[in-house]
Structures are given as structure tokens and as C-alpha cells.
Image: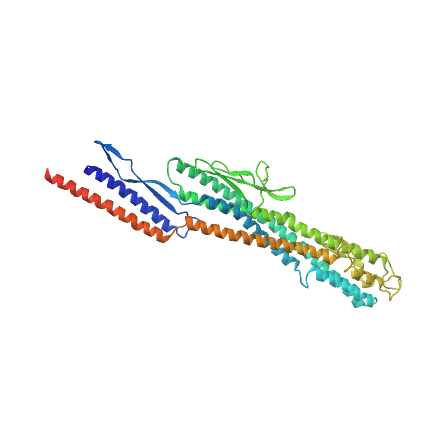
Amino acid sequence: MGISRVFDLSRRSLATYQRALDVTSHNIANAANPNFTRQRINFVAEKPELQSGFVWGTGVKMDQLQRVRNTLADTQLRSTMPRFYDNQSKSAMLGQIEAVLTEPSELGVSTLMNSFFNSWSELAVSPNSAPLRSDVIQTAQRLATKVANIHSELDQMRSDILNEYKTKVNALNHHLKDLQSLNSQIVEFKAIGNSAGDLEDQRDAIIDEISKLANVNIQRDKAGSINLSIGGIYAADSSNYVEFQVGTKNGKLSIVAPDGTMPTSLNSGELNALSTVYTDKIPGYLEKLDVVISKMMTEVNTLHSSAYTLGENPLSGINFFEDYSGGELKINSRIVNDPNMIAVSADGSAGNGNIAVSLSELGTKKILNGTTLAENYQSLISELGHDKISADETAASNEFVLQQLEAQKVSYSGVSIDEEMTNVIRFQRSYDAAAKLIKVADEMLQTLIQMV
């Protein structure tokens, strides 16, 4: 091996280990970056040369700069992530609904409805009592106010959910735009043989954000691009991305592609949670409440209209409630203005309170699908509680899996300062050795020159 060959071999070694030190320094600098994937250099021997019947080694080179990434763990994370955020989001919204219903408490519909029927029982004992008649009206008003507040607050919650859905769809579109841009840059980098590790980290972080919003499917092509689909809709690649709008599918809140296409399998993620609570849960709970209140109004009016009011000329055929619509339970204005218009007498006599007894018994009679009004309303509360517990338990289970997968990801792809510092020492020594080899070659060359 000639002196010039020693110089060339040493020069290549210096360049290789300098690059290795650069990569290691980059790893250390990003040790606290949660989206960073550790990078590793693969060393290989340079192509040997055949000369004078001998095979001469030509040193070392960097074969490739590799991201230490577990794609299987990524797939599992992105499968679990939308399920976790779906149930976490549902749990939070269902908790808000529980707070609106305030069950069980003195302010809940169950207690207020019970107070309403109890007021009739008390009036039955003293049908001519003005305070007791006023108490019937007041308990009815408190119940009506609570029902109206529930409707109002849940309607406002639906409006807030719709706005939140629109905000998250805008965020989704922003992520898809960034994904397409990064795909394009990565393809360009790889086409000329360059590493795109940092860009790929940014891309993975964006895909993780999208996975919080919706369940995704990804396919990698040979050029290095990731082609992403959402709920069965092709959403982004290296050339294009879809800008979704907000629409409805079979009455359910949904994302819509510009060509009108809607996802066929968007079944998890924050968007699905918002859609489910907006479309199914809140309307379903309100419908069950309306069934109870409507039945109560009908039964009360049937009995009340059969009774006689208090006064010199008793009247019959008067409904206690005027109407129930849109959560507004209206008490007959004639009764509100004149409590004597409350009808409880079965025969028109002033001391008769037989109908008040029957009205009070509505609270314990099975008049709605084989259940009492309270039991039927309690089924709503039980359903809400079951939905909340189910969301809590599923979210907790998914969170545990996510934590395990994140720990695996950090263990596999994260930066270990101790390991990187070991590499710094190792590469520094190799660099120093190559530098010393250059010095030796230089001394040999100087000796030869002096001999001439």
C-alpha cells in the first residue's frame, strides 16, 4: 500500500467519523424532543481494489443513515389512539350532560316531579286551601323550569359540539395539507439519495395528530410517500390532499369530501365522539325526557279536566297544562292567575278533593310502558350512567395500552444519553486514530523527500 493510499484511506475515515459525530450530536440535542426518532449510522467497508494480484482494503464509509423506528408499534399506536380519544371525548361530554341533569339531587327532575305529585296529595286533604293550591302551581313551575333548562343547556351543548366539530375538521384539513407537503419533500430528498429522517419525524407527528381525530389507514410507496385514508376516503399522498367539509350522512354529523363522498368506516376518534353525542346521545336523552313529561301532562290533564274548580260556579273541562313543546311545559295561564281554577272536586262541592287524590297517585301508577313515570325517567339516567361508565372504562383500558406502546416506542426509538455519549467516545477515538494515521503518512512522506 503506497503512502498516497494511506492518505486517501485516512481522509475517508476522518470524513466518516466526523459525520458519525455529527449524527450523535444531533441525537443528543433532540433527547428531549418527544417526536424525534434516534438516528443511527451503518458503517461498511469501502469497495476493495485489486492491484498487483493483491486485494487492498480502502477504508470505511457510511452506508446509510437509519431511523431507529418500529413500524409495527406505530401501527398499533395509531390503531389504539383513535379509540382512546373517542372514548375520552365521549366521557367528558357525557359528564357535562350528567351535570345538566343533576341526578340524583333535590334539583333533579325525579325529585321535582315527586314534589309535584306530593303537592296534590297535600291539596287532597284541604282542597280549599289557598296556600296549598299555590304550592301545586309552584311545584309545577319548578318542574317546568328544570325541564326547560335541561333542553336549553343541552341544545346549547349541541351547538357548542357542532362548532367544535367544525374546528377539528379545519385542524384535520391543516394536518392533511402539511402531510402532503412533507410527503413531497421526503420523496424529493430520497430521490437524490439523501436522508429525510427529521422530515419523517414531522410527518409521523402529524399522522399521530390525525389519528386522534379519526381512524386512519396508511400505505407506504416505494418513493417514500405515505398515502393516508380516513374512514375509507383517500385523504393525502405526495401530490394531493382532500379538504373536508362538514355535512350529514343519514342525519349524522360527518366529514364530506369536495366530491360529496362521505366516509364509510369513520368509527373512532374525536370526530366520531362529537358526531355520536351530537346526533345520537343528546337527542336520544331529550326524547326519553319528552316522553315522560308528555305522558305526565296527558294524564294530569285527563284527570284535571274531569274535575271541578273552586268557587260559586264550579267549572270543569279545564286542562292544568296548556302544552309541552321544545322543552317548554306551559301551565294553564288561567290557573297561574287564579289558583281557584285548579280542579280537584269530583262533584263540584267545595270540600271534595277526590281528583287530587287520583292526581297524586299518578306518581306511583305504572302508566308508561308498564312503568311509573319516575321509573321510566330513571331508565334515562341509568342509560346515561351506563354510557358514561362504558366510555370511562374503555378509555382507561385504551390509555393503559397506549402507555405501554409509548414506553416501547421510547425504549426503541428514543435517545439514550449514556449510549450516545459512549458513541461519542468511540467515534472520537476512531477519528483520532485516523488523524494519527495521516500524521504517520506525512512523516513517511517527509522522510522519502529528504532521501531524494
Q: Quadrant of residue 358?
A: bottom right
Residue 434 lies, with reference to residue 141, above or below; the image says above
Front position in the image: 436 or 234: 436
- Counting from the top left corner in percent of width and height, residue 162 is at 60, 48
- Counting from the top left corner in percent of width and height, residue 377 is at 71, 56
- Counting from the top left corner in percent of width and height, residue 157 is at 62, 52
Front position in the image: 383 or 164: 383
Question: Residue drawn 51% across and 51% down?
Answer: 401
Does residue 62 appear in the picture of this structure? yes
Outermost front residue: 53
Q: Quadrant of the N terminus?
A: top left
Outermost top residue: 52
1 with respect to 306 (left or right): left
Question: Residue drawn 36% across and 42% down?
Answer: 65
Q: Quadrant of residue 258?
A: top right
Question: Is the image coloured rainbow, by chain, by secondary structure, or in one colour?
Answer: rainbow
Residue 364 lies, with reference to residue 448, above or below; the image says below
